[in-house]
Amino acid sequence: MNVSELQAQISLGEDSRRQFKRDVTNVDSLAAEMAAFANSEGGTIYLGVADDGSLAGLSRSDVKRLNQLIGNAASQHVRSPLTVQTENIGVGEERVIIMLTIPKGQDKPYFDRNGVIWLKSGADKRRVNSKEELRRLFQSVDQFHADELPTKAGIDKLDKLRFRDFLRNVYKQDFPDSPDKLTRLLQNMDLATENGMLNLAGVLLFAERPEWIKPQFIIKAIRYPGNEIHSTEYLDTEDFTGPFRKIFEDALAFVMRNLHKIQAGRGVNAPGIPEIPPSVFEELLVNALIHRDYLVSATIRLFIFDNRIEIISPGHLPDNLTVEKIRNGISNIRNPILVSYVAKGILPYKGLGSGIKRALEDWPDISFTDDRESCLFTATVHRKEVKGSEKPAEVADEGSGKSSQKSSQKSSPISSPISSPKTENRIIELINRDAFVSTVHLGEILNISKRAVLKQIQKLKEQGRLKRVGPAKGGHWEVIE
């Protein structure tokens, strides 16, 4: 590096990858700086550069002393020892800048001589004081994974029917006939710890009520009016809990009932086509569930606006991953136990690294934000203005137990007058417009009670004109021609 290139770097100022020091006399202080860089993304210390960026330089004797100091700090005062590089750059008559480069560590975490773990925090450094940060360091070098964390849930919290069906369908194996055999099987399947408690993967995949054990690992969904977050105003909202499969299906149903439906030349009695292919949200929701950072105690958030749909996952992209890399199909397994079981059919998972690419192929207008400062990753699906489409019913799904807050901005398209004199035919027409409409909303439109709606729906079922696909909560109606 020549002087002009050095000055260009110095002019950028100090940050998490660049630090200036006029001089160093304390070997422990230098070792702490080295450990902080190695535990983060690596970086460079410019010795002989003042805090204001001026090139004070070092004398020959300073250079000799500092080279000895650097060697001692890297080999004896940091554990494990570091391999660093130095480059001397002349900046005037017998004045030198030492450019000390510390690589990103491959053997994290690194300690100073006093056993303190340091991390870069902007241009500064800070101590690691929490178990979560320490676990994340181990996770970054594949020595630890969040989905193997022990929980306080015993095997009695297992959803035995769900686990039994999984064993039969995937392994052609019967459910164990004793608690001891069940515990050993769960341990062998990496779903329980050595002391017989379910680990995080076991809870998320097969516990009967995961939200009672880990209430933070759910999906919170809100449909807002307009394009901004409101503190009190919303059109639809729901929290999705339960094992992975149930969370996935319920969240997907929430998205689908809040999308516009396009007739696209289809008959009036045919259900409309969603404005965005369902496969897009299948891929993004699976990606959010299996690749989020479970060391961050926060929910996945699903926000629907008029012009976009956001899926916000706790945790930024791991290691060296970038948005550009994931767009090209490059991935990194953060939760290998979850991935291995999802790949066995628990969710519609089609392969590591291919989900984002498939979503982009089906809907190219998706942007991704890797917010490392806030520790969040956001996938934003941009909506297009659709003419001649049916807007979604702006209420909660049947059986959700939640009613949507009324808004002056909303006007449901399915509440327009219908000419058919018979209530059954009116229900059929309303369901043709929105297969996800709830019985509560049908009652509001028809000005009859929910009980009366249920009675009419039962008659339609008996006549063979209507059937329910899926559960009351999260399913949809299907009109039989």
Image (cartoon, helix red, strand yellow):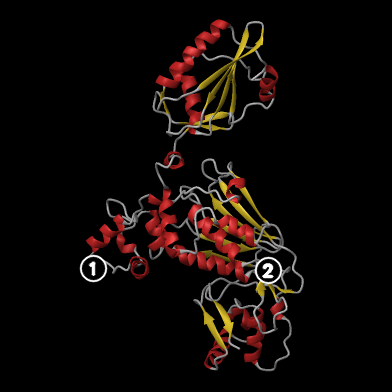
Q: Which residue is mark 1?
A: 177
On residue 270, which mark appears?
none
Q: Residues within 10 Å of mark 2 (few under 14, many from 20)?
A: some
Residue 329 appears at what percent x and percent y?
56, 51
Vertical order, 332 against 46 (above or below): below
The answer to which of marks 1 and 2 sits earlier in the sequence is 1
Vertical order, 219 against 477 (above or below): above
Closer to us: 119 or 349: 349
Quadrant of residue 453 in the image? bottom right
Vertical order, 165 against 9 (above or below): below
Q: Amino acid at mark 2?
A: Glu
Q: Residue at x 61, y 11 (%)?
A: 96
Q: Which residue is mark 2?
A: 275
Q: Which quadrant holds the C terminus?
A: bottom right
Quadrant of residue 113 in the image? top left
Q: Amino acid at mark 1?
A: Asp
Residue 94 appears at what percent x and percent y?
63, 6
Residue 242 appears at what percent x and percent y?
45, 65
Q: Is residue 129 visible?
A: yes
Closer to us: 50 or 213: 50
| Cα–Cα span, label 1 and label 2 | 49 Å
Q: Is residue 242 visible?
A: no
Relative to 32, is 384 on the left or the right? Answer: right
